Image (cartoon, rainbow, N blue to C red):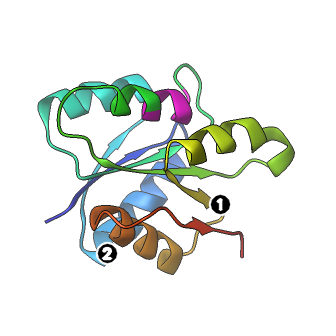
Amino acid sequence: MVQVLVVDDRPDVRLSFLYMLQAIGYDVAEACDGYTALEYMQSKPVDVLLTDLFMPGMDGVGLVETVINTPRRRPALVVMTGEPPSKTSRRLEAARRLGVQVLEKPITRDQLESAIKRAAQGLPAATAGRK
């Protein structure tokens, strides 16, 4: 079973993604920030890391960069954001340069399922727009 770690500083958003992913059939864990996510990944294997772009402390790009530079099994990476493009452009470009899928909130169940499936299968990054 694919293990997905959902990282978002907002509990309501985390739980929403947690419930959607569990309903689809994934094994899901959650973390409230980048530091907690890194701690979790030190003790348990993660296949897909789904992280918010903007979080206090370590943001999504910082988390992705840290994971990429960690010399052990690396999970597939998906970044999500609900911020307007004017606020996210530099961070989104940084994520895309790293080859990370980017999802823009609100995210439908179908978009989420497609992104996680692509990531878990190691397919090239795709970007899903807002609906």
Find disc 1 in the rendering and name its residue: 105
**Local secondary structure at mark 2:** helix
The residue segment tinted magenta is 59-64
Mark 1: few, some, or many residues within 10 Å (few <14, many ≥20)?
some
Q: Report the mark closest to the observer, 1 or 2.
A: 1
Residue ID at (37%, 70%): 118
Lower position in the chain sequence, tag 1 or tag 2: 2
Q: Quadrant of residue 97?
A: top right
Name the spot of residue 12 as percent of width and height, x first: 53, 50
In the rendered structure, the answer to whether residue 115 lies left or right of residue 43 reads right
Give the residue at the far top of this rendering. Answer: 57
What residue type is disc 1 on?
Lys
In the rendered structure, the answer to whether residue 31 lies left or right of residue 57 reads left
Residue ID at (63%, 36%): 54
Q: Quadrant of residue 22?
A: bottom left
Verify whether residue 61 appears in magenta.
yes
Give the residue at the far bottom of this rendering. Answer: 110
Residue ID at (43%, 54%): 15
Find disc 2 in the rendering and name its residue: 23
Q: Nearer the viewer, residue 67 or 130?
A: 67
Q: Quadrant of the C terminus?
A: bottom right
Name the spot of residue 31 as percent of width and height, x first: 37, 37
Q: Quadrant of the N terminus?
A: bottom left
- Asked if residue 38 shows in the view, the reply is yes
